[in-house]
Image (cartoon, rainbow, N blue to C red):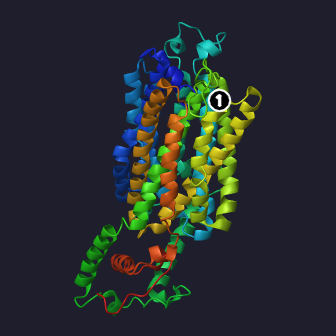
Amino acid sequence: MSIFPYVYYMVSSFHVTNDEKSTAMYAGMVTSAFAIAEFSTGVLWGRISDRFGRKPVLLTGLAGTGVSMLMFGFAPNLWVALLARAMGGLLNGNIGVINTTVAEVVTQESHQSRAFSIMPGIWCIGSIVGAGLGGTLADPVRNYPGYFASKGIFGRYPYLLPNLVCCTVVILSLVVGLLFLEETHEDKRERRDVGLEVGDWLLQRLRRPVIFSEKVRIMEEFRLLRDSDSRDSCDDYSSIDSPALLPLTASTAELSSGGPAALEAGSSQGKDMVVSGTFTPQVLIIIVSYGLLAFHTISAEQLLPVLLSMPQASEMPHLPFFFTGGFALPTKTIGSILSLQGIIQTIATLVVFPFVSQRLGSLATFRLSVLTYPFLYLLVPYLTVMPETVQRPLLYIVIVWKVTAQAFAFPPLQILLANSAPSKKVLGTLNGSAASSASLCRAIGPTLSGLIQSAGLSIGCLGLPWWSSSIVAVMAAVLSLALTDDRRKTRSDPELLHADASSQVASPGDMDVEVRPLSPERP
């Protein structure tokens, strides 16, 4: 988000073209380079996190982001800027992995709306700070001539300062994650983590009230008690609608005749069945919805700062379709507006969304959001032809509308995907696939909208890219009608439950939704 206030001016400073219509297209290319590269590695990072754990992937993504920011700040031309953005996307698979981590930590449906609103809320806070830093610190020689010399490093690289500050924040996040972030992958939690041990030691040295060694001891005792209870009292784990599990006796463990050998074969077969049933129709619809939503929202994020940056119209408008011009705002003002947008979105995400979602449900909240987007995009271009006395108030109304719709769109879609996963073991793959779908569309969106904007400006039609995004938003709204929100049905599919039971020997700690007995007539 920190590059949005100044990316248009940065591309202009490269002097790739003297045509301001083409500058918008190149700005879109810089914005989308990150997403193109992220798309190519999104599923890969998800699978790596399934195999090696979530924490290593998250830390790698932070490191890649820091390096790419430095490279972007030192970019002397458009091609280095594109390469830096692409490098950041290749090394960053954090979006899908973070969603997987949240899904693994929070399994109770009543807590999901609050939990899945936290990460978008943190994103909004980052957007506030990032947009403010980007707009305030960009080109410091021009904005603060008394403090920065024109012949210094910031005169040569006018957009280095905001990237240096953001890189410092990333390094701090990397250190905090290394020392205090716990692994959430169910098969990797017990392995030794030197970083956590160092963090524990540091906290003890600082005499913090939280004593992690005692916490670890208590958690270990709880795990042993849970494992002991699971062998003797599996009949206690049942839902209201289901009979109890069969006790884990030797006869039950033998999925068919053959004893341990049959159990091992059943485990292998179960894993294959889970993998083969990963991409259900519901999951595929959600992944496509992710892509469509990402396409038109990132296009709007790209188009709005450009609209605010563009000079005012020099020709009379020919309504209703042919008119041009922007707001001609400086980078500092654009940064302030985007920071205000982040503040509003934070409130909408952390306060309003959980309240609405708990009353309407995730699916209804998502549909409410996507149905409003087409009308939003239809109206935005007409702000530029409004009288100046009402332009700014209407702009703020549009921003509130936009960020509230976004706060109501992504978190419920994440909840729907988590609830549609046939097994926790494939959450990383599913979230990686969804992140790749979103990244691909985030890559195509700004570039395509930039091209459409250039074409629209050439014929005097400023609204063409916005109205094109409205068409995509209509497609997303129609697709939302095919979604369902039946968690029980998705999680308790007989084939997948049988496979999961075979591979995990009916561990009740892993069955956090509806638990059903193994069918006696099926091996």
Q: Residue at x 37, y 29 (%)?
A: 83
Q: Nearer the viewer, residue 151 or 393?
A: 393
- Residue 226: percent from the left, percent from the top? 50, 78
Q: Nearer the viewer, residue 508 or 305?
A: 305
Location of the C terminus by quadrant is bottom left
With respect to residue 498, does 468 lie above or below?
A: above
Q: Quadrant of residue 443?
A: top left
With respect to residue 420, does 470 lie above or below?
A: above
Q: Residue at x 49, y 41 (%)?
A: 468
Q: Secondary structure at mark 1?
A: helix
Q: Nearer the viewer, residue 486 or 82?
A: 486
Binning the other alpha carbons within 10 Å of mark 1 as few (below 14), some (14 to 19) or many (20 upward) gives many
* Residue holding disc 1: 384
- Residue 216: percent from the left, percent from the top? 54, 63
Q: Quadrant of residue 254?
A: bottom left
Inspect this view and state whether residue 70 appears: no
Q: Residue furthest right?
A: 389
Inspect this view and state whether residue 10 appears: yes
- Horizontal side of 1 relative to 277 (left or right) equals right
- Residue 58: percent from the left, percent from the top? 45, 48
| Amino acid on which disc 1 is placed | Thr
Location of the N terminus by quadrant is top right
Q: Residue at x 64, y 10 (%)?
A: 145
- Residue 413: percent from the left, percent from the top? 52, 58
- Horizontal side of 144 relative to 15 (left or right) equals right
- Horizontal side of 342 relative to 1 (left or right) equals right
